[in-house]
Amino acid sequence: MANTLYRNTFRRGLFDFHAGEAVPEVELNVADYIEAAVKAGVQTITFMTKDAFGNSYFNTRIGHKNIRLKGDLLAEVVEEARKHGIAIIAYYNVGLNSHVAAANPDYRQRTSDQEPIVEAFDYYDLLCMNSPYRDYVYGQFQEIAENYGVAGFFFDITYVWSNSCYCEYCSAWYKSRYGKPMPHSPQPGTQELKEFQSFQRDIRHNFLRDAASRIKAINPDLLVGWNHAGDPRFGQVEADRYADYFTSEFHPPHYAHGSLLARWKRSFGKPFELMMPSEMGSWGEWTVAPEATLRTTAAIAVVNGGSISFGHVAYPSGFMKGQVPEPVMQAMGETNEWVKSLEPWLKDAESVPMAAVLHSIESKRLLEASVHAYAADEPHLQGLHRILTEGHIHFDIIDEAVLLEKLDEYELLVLPDQAYLSEAVENRIREFVRQGGRLLASNRTSLYDGDGGRKPSFGLADVFGIEFADVSNYSVSYFYPVDRAVSGSVPNMPILLKDSDQNTLRITAKPGAETLAKFTDPALEAKPFRHVYHQHAHPAVETPYPAIVSHSYGEGTSMYIAAPIESAYWRTGSPWLRTLYLNILNLLYPEPKVKVEAPLSVEVNVMRQPDRAVVHLTNVREEKAAGSKTFVEEIVPAKHIEVVMKTTAERVYVVPGGVELPFTKEGDRIRCVVPEIGLHAAIVVEGSNL
């Protein structure tokens, strides 16, 4: 089951029943709930076994059972779900447990000044996974695995709090490992901070490794997964290898983030889900989001190769006690019906390798521990994701392990500000370009060594065709002049490049490299005592320093941009930076396997099944309301989408619906036009060799 359940199902539910004991009763009408779930098309339910308060919802000899609960809720749900063919995944909140915290204060996570973490997430007591509390948790896992017919486990809150954990158990562990006491305030750029961050990762890694091992020892077919498994912001790839499936939360209106998560997760070859509250924005808001919002999030999950899991909960008490509101189940059901209509074109589908974006875990960790500019929300990755999706480019986000193994399958590699690359990764990239691959890199890529020191020049200087000279003294720069080969529809004037954390780099081009743009400096560096206008000074001084360089290397070509252009785009939204970036890509990579002309709102995913290709077109317009939270309430159609594919074709049609799509053959390519789509349409090419 561990190898098939999550690969063959796409419609999931999360029964997020953090009821607590503050209410007078806790009830669920199990038969009615499961009947409603069946009607809503749910195939698996991640069901509460232990909540954030520390209350269990099953008969436990180890833990504290919710005193408001009658009977064994988990047993009832498992039995009723089995009758209808629904698999139950045991939700277990690991880190939060007020009952254990009160009885065992030494188990609490603590800051360096020995203050316990209380009111985590505003309300809860947070315990340490490195303390004997882990044995309490493993004991409850054993109870569930041995006594209940669940299909697997989902762990929540397996986190180490910021500036934690300094409990007595972690302090002893650290001293044993490093031979010195834990540092109270490790400073950026020091070995102490690197060690402390590694230690924090190991707390979580060791707990998850051992949890998976113990559960598998009881029943190897039980699935094991946890919140933020396969999440690039966590980047804890060592622990992730013990997960059978990946999960991350997905909250509207951050639709682009769901797509980014999915593109990263799918590169590891494991089934994954995006988990969205069916409520308005987050967990526990008790009011359903518009069905169009649910359908949008579902589309983003499934067309990227994953599944959707909708969080929902019954009212535990009061006049509607024991019921999940009918509008919630109806909205889930309508969305799941739409997902079901696509499933023949989702099963066993894999991303077609075309463009790869490297998100280096080693570089991420180096910057996290260094004095160099680094933002936890990783604007370089988010900015690049936005550029590529708005440019209708199909791509995967990969780590260095996938790069070393599979880079030859791709035609294009993008390195967005990847400050540190190991020698093995550099050599693999060098060989990729030498053999005909295309490379686009930006900013600090390969400029730093494994200790965070800046090298004399880029590690890939020979591939980029450049040498490092210096860092600009100015907090803003302007692209100007820009060669017509990459300027396109960009206005013929200096184009602002502004990133709040980083300045542009000064480089020189090697013989044989072609400079496609240079930097122009501002008239002065703005200060309260010296400025022009309100923000920064106007462009005034042309420099000799290249901004964009093209270089042939072996049979391949590289393009290098000497600026944090991806993060600048994320922070400013400048359409000229996006246009310039896409023009550079078009010059470097003019004939991808699939090329799409469409409105900015249309995202492209190219998947393949045996003997056919499926090109998903997902139309997501993010609605704005002066910065407040918004939801998708209506789908605005996108019209006249032109698609050119380098493939054979026996038949081309659009799903859902199966309407035949006329196409023309042009050499080794086919061309077709989709007149209009709503939220989504997919072009299916039967007999494709894509």
Image: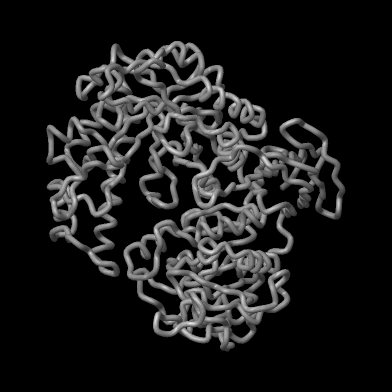
Above or below for 19 versus 212: above
Above or below for 317 versus 293: above
Nearer to the camera, 119 or 218: 119
| Residue drawn 49% across the image and 79% down it | 505
Nearer to the camera, 569 or 173: 569
| Residue drawn 51% across the image and 70% down it | 564
Above or below for 412 versus 267: below
Nearer to the camera, 281 or 213: 281
Please provide percent x and percent y for residue 287. 47, 30
Please provide percent x and percent y for residue 30. 41, 13
Please provide percent x and percent y for residue 404. 50, 58
Which of the 4 quarters of the picture holds residue 134?
top left
Please provide percent x and percent y for residue 367. 37, 65
Q: Can I make out residue 423 in this image?
A: no
| Residue drawn 36% across the image and 29% down it | 91
Total numbered labels? 0
Which of the 4 quarters of the picture holds residue 349?
top right
Q: Can I make out residue 92 in this image?
A: yes
Q: Report the side of 98 relative to 299 (left or right).
A: left
